[in-house]
Amino acid sequence: MGQPKVFIAHPDGSGYAAYANMFLRMGWEVVDTVGRADLIQFTGGADVNPSLYGHAKHPTTTCDMARDLQDAQYFEMGKRLGKSMAGICRGGQFLNVSNGGELIQHVDGHGVGSMHLVVDSNTGATIEVSSTHHQMMLPSDKAVVVAVARESSYKLVFEEKEVDVQRKMPDDIEVLYYDEYNCLCFQPHPEFAYAPHCREYYFACIRNYLGLGA
């Protein structure tokens, strides 16, 4: 199959070098067009606009419509060209929304710079991952739940009013897979230098679900 190739969406964004260096260290080639890529990598950033999944905007939500439009263009290109797609943090949340999912707009227990354990739903293995998000994926019924955590004490959904769904949804869903467009949604940050186990798990998920990499 040869060396796998990745196109990193939002190439002019902050943090691009960290994503590129991560893939280079793992033996991938970073390419400058979607057409040459085996994988489109969506990255972290501002919250996804709730209008994209039919919810009102929570007071803690901060959006970047230009970013949403850019990511939507890459997603449509990926669908049209049959490319595998993966998203980290905001990128994973965007792919979840693009596949019919929604978002919990505010959650505790996942603060900047913290680490916690996730449990792989297939193997039962526990993996230490990074955590830098205040929102969380709410999957559609088409999703495969790959990994979950139990860190939060509240999960706030904001449609017409604020609703705490913690009792109905005790698991913190961290990793999802959507088969229809071959999309991996990964909320932790494997590109962080202090999270080697998270990085190893991310590339294991890419191999196991997207069929890419050695």
Image: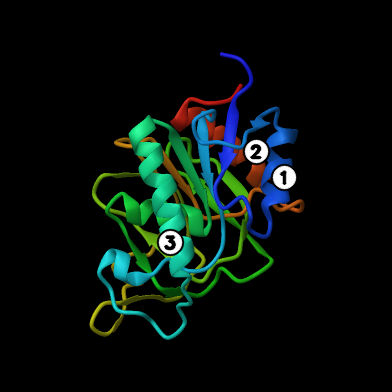
Q: Earlier in the sequence, mark 1 or mark 3?
A: 3
Question: Do the residues bearing badges 2 and 1 touch, measured as CB atoms within 8 Å?
Answer: yes
Pointer 1: residues within 10 angstroms few (<14), some, or many (20+)?
some
* Residue at far top of view: 1
Task: Give the quarter of the image for residue 29.
Answer: top right
Report the Cα–Cα distance between label 1 and label 3.
29 Å
Q: Secondary structure at mark 3?
A: helix
Amino acid tagged 1: Pro
Residue at the image position 76 percent from the left and 51 percent from the top = 193
Question: Is residue 188 shown left or right of residue 167?
Answer: right
* Residue 88 shown left or right of residue 176 in the figure: right
The quadrant of the rendering that contains the C terminus is: top right
Res 145 seen here = no
SS for callout 1: helix
| Residue drawn at x 42%, y 76% as measured from the top left | 154
Question: For the point 29% across and 36% down, which residue is it?
Answer: 180
Instruction: Relative to 95, say whether 158 is above or below.
Output: below
Per the rendering, the mark at residue 196 is 1
The amino acid type found where label 3 is placed reads Asp
* Mark with earlier residue (2, 3): 3
**Can you give x and y, in whole percent of width and height, for residue 124 in the image?**
48, 40
Marking on residue 68: 3
Residue at 57% in and 46% down: 126
Placement of 203 over or under 192, stated as above or below: above
Residue 139 horizontal side relative to residue 48, left or right: left
Instruction: Give x and y (percent) for residue 82.
Output: 37, 30
- Which quadrant of the rendered structure holds the N terminus? top right
> How far is the residue under mark 2 from the one under mark 3?
28 Å
Q: Amino acid at mark 2?
A: Glu
Label 2 neighbourhood size at 10 Å, few (<14), some (14-19), many (20+)?
some
Residue 192 at x, y = what percent?
A: 71, 53
Circle 2 is placed at which residue position? Answer: 200
